[in-house]
Image: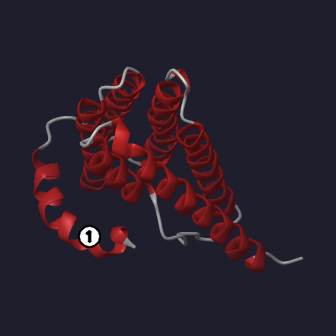
């Protein structure tokens, strides 16, 4: 959705920046992971606006690492793709883990936020797994309304307003993660021979 609308516009400013980046894509991938771990820690202690900044840094590194990898031979190939995919999953879990810890530790807790975070994280992981497995058997799978970029936009925007307004965003994230998971499963299953 947003990915398709913005991909070409983002490429216009990312490609020239990628040409000037003095280090390889794997370093950017690692920096994105470090920013996501930082974001998770900030979410866990309730520093939601700062966590949003860390998520934005992680997302920027994730966009740039692919652009840098395409511009250069170093850091590309199977090893770079594997590192990028693995760190994306860890990054997502660090962010969702921090959010989960924050709401689970609140006095009187917030069961809606806790359950929505759990569903959003779990369904996002399964949707990513389905995509990975489908590509391993030769079926391209990019269906689903909310991909990683959309999730980051929602997390960044909602986080800037603090934890009180974040619960609505978690419900949205959970709903769209379930949609992506179900859509991908059906899409791949229908394209596989019996």
SS label for mark 1:
helix
60 relative to 105, above or below: below
Q: Residues within 10 Å of mark 1 (few under 14, many from 20)?
A: few
Q: Quadrant of the C terminus?
A: bottom right
Query: In the rendered view, does 114 fall on the left or right side of 193?
Result: left
Of residues 159 and 110, the one drawn nearer to the viewer in this rendering: 110
Q: Which residue is mark 1?
A: 6
Q: Residue at x 14, y 67 (%)?
A: 12
The image shows residue 22 at horizontal and vertical percentages of 14, 36
Q: Residue furthest front?
A: 108
Q: Quadrant of residue 127?
A: bottom right
The answer to whether residue 119 is above or below residue 36 is below
Residue 155 picture location, percent across and down: 36, 47
- Name the residue rendered at 38%, 28% in the picture: 43
**Nearest the camera: 100 or 19?**
100
Please tell me whether residue 152 is drawn above or below residue 96 in the rendered image. Answer: below
Number of marks in the image?
A: 1
Q: Could you say which is closer to the camera, residue 29 or residue 168?
A: 168
Residue at left 49%, top 70%? Answer: 145
Q: Is residue 78 visible?
A: yes
Residue 136, position as x, y percentages in the image: 67, 59
Give the colour scheme shown.
Answer: secondary structure
Left or right: 124, with 20 as reference point = right
Between 155 and 14, the residue placed more toward the observer is: 155
- Which quadrant is the N terminus positioned in? bottom left
Residue 73 visible to an observer of this rendering:
no
Q: Where is residue 115? Give x, y as percent.
A: 62, 42
| Left or right: 94, with 120 as reference point | left
């Amino acid at each position: 959705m947003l990915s398709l609308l913005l991909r070409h516009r983002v490429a216009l400013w990312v490609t020239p920046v990628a040409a000037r980046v003095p280090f390889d894509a794997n370093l950017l991938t690692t920096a994105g992971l470090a920013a996501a771990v930082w974001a998770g820690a900030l979410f866990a202690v309730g520093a939601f606006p700062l966590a949003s900044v860390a998520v934005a840094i992680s997302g920027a590194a994730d966009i740039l690492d692919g652009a840098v990898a395409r511009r250069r031979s170093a850091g590309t190939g199977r090893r770079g793709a594997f590192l990028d995919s693995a760190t994306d999953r860890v990054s997502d879990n660090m962010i969702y883990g921090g959010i989960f810890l924050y709401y689970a530790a609140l006095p009187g807790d917030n069961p809606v936020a806790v359950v929505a975070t759990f569903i959003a994280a779990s369904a996002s992981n399964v949707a990513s797994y389905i995509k990975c497995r489908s590509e391993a058997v030769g079926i391209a799978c990019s269906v689903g309304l909310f991909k990683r970029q959309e999730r980051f936009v929602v997390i960044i925007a909602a986080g800037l307003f603090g934890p009180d307004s974040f619960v609505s965003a978690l419900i949205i994230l959970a709903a769209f993660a379930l949609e992506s998971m179900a859509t991908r499963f059906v899409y791949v299953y229908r394209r596989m021979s019996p």
